[in-house]
Amino acid sequence: MQRFVPGQAHALHTIAATQRIEQAAQASLPAHTLMQRAGRAVACLALAIAPHARRYWIACGPGNNGGDGLEAATHLLQHGKTPIVTWLGHAGSLPEDARLALEWARAANVVFSATPPEDCDCAIDALLGLGVTRPPDGQMAEHIAELNRLRSRGVPVLSVDLPTGLQADTGNAPGACVQASHTLALLTLKPGLFTAQGRDAAGDIWFDELDVSLSPPQSAQALLNPAPATHARKHATHKGSYGDVAVIGGAPGMGGAALLAARAALQSGAGRVYVGLLDPGGALMDALQPELMLRRPEALMNQLSGLTVVCGCGGDDAVSALLPDLLSQAPRLVLDADALNAVAKEPALRTLLQNRGRSGSALSTVLTPHPLEAARLLNTDAHSVQTDRLAAAQTMADRWGCTIVLKGSGTVISTPGTAPRINPTGNGRLATAGTGDVLAGLIGARLAQDATSFEAACSAVYAHGLAADSWPPQQPLTAGGLARVLGP
């Protein structure tokens, strides 16, 4: 068993892949072995997170997830604890493993109750695992509400495999969902734990493979984004060795967005950073960052061949006129914010984007939509995007032959022909104006240094989130402050 910490590229398996792994393991092991291992692991973690607890409420559902909980209850009793089980199953319809777990729990004199105990020191959510097909209702919804009430009072709540109500493949929770303090993922890590509502619902994630050798990562639906490798700069280099970034945006009243992106690119190691403000009356020097070279946008448009362009930050409608040339000529291009909205509005720009994707490796493109911008690009709504973030990101990547950074909790990075990555860093403190502009500039800097679009996006998203995770808790996080702490 191990506690999940960001930094390694763990494979993430869908429901279907997990079930195939489980069936293969069961065929090679004595009957009931996996559930016994699972129950023992749950009990061990429960003892670890609440070592002084005496009374444990184990909320068991009608299937194998409930069977894991029943096994855990038997183990807790053997450790001298007082487990109290509420069980929502029916003996006549139980899977065989869960039926045996029920018989053994009863034979061990585990206490069963029709209602949750009035008080407990630790609660275990073993209601539903992979089997969520609809929003929980009835008694199950009532038990979820009680588990969440306990959690709000500071009682540890440990979910078995997944918080009940959370969909394993998507992280979507269409109804009531347990908000756990800890989740023990069993056999495989599931994508839904790391994106959409999963990160809030799962709490502290632990993982136990149950002594089963997992299938190769190629069978995974997604991978967790690993920490980017760091490379010391060689002595015999110069500013031209680290790429030229041009940020084009900043229409009247929105110059700050472009400057934030440019400062982030500079702080992240770009050799030279130019800014083309779309405000005709905009300043031609950034007094806070005088290293930035401000130019009129038309001047930058005449030297595209040597630039990595970040376009759209604060661009408003003025950015539309520049996009045909950028899409046709810029060798490396990051489209953010208003550039994405312009592409969503204009079929001709979508055609140019698609043609750009068909050019192969000659032109690199990264799109950085938040869910509403993604919905506009896909001609749908933000709810539909959030319902299956992995599918939405991959659809955009395949449609336009580019790298997609679908921002949000558990940012998804997708590109054609590669398993998508889910980023494990970052937190809600990034929900403030300008942090997306900082990310766009950071991606531009990485892309300018000869990384592929997918590598640049993965590296930048991880570093961006890590900076927020490392932010001093007593200080408010601002985009300007975030840009200043980024490194190459």
Image (spheres, helix red, strand yellow):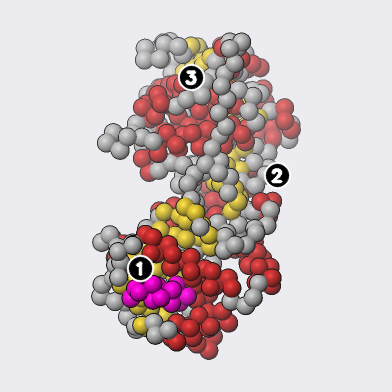
Label located before the other in sequence (2 or 3): 3
Mark 3 nearby-residue class (10 Å; few <14, some 14–19, many ≥20) = many
Tell me where residue 162 appears, x and y as whole percent. 48, 63
Mark 2 nearby-residue class (10 Å; few <14, some 14–19, many ≥20) = few
Spot the residue most to the front.
Answer: 79
Residue 417: which numbered mark, if any? Answer: 2
Q: Nearer the viewer, residue 291 or 101?
A: 101
Tell me where residue 201 appears, x and y as whole percent. 41, 57
* Residue in view at x 59 percent, y 16 percent: 234
Viewer can see residue 141 = no
Q: Name the secondary structure under disc 3.
A: helix
Nearest to viewer (mark 2 / mark 1)? 1
Point out the stretch of residues depicted in magenta: 69-82
Is 75 a magenta residue?
yes
Q: Is residue 347 above or below residue 276?
A: below
* Residue in view at x 48 percent, y 50 percent: 4
User: Where is mark 1, residue-wise?
Assistant: 123
Spatial CA distance of label 2 from label 1 is: 42 Å
* Residue in view at x 36 percent, y 35 percent: 471
User: Where is mark 3, residue-wise?
Assistant: 266
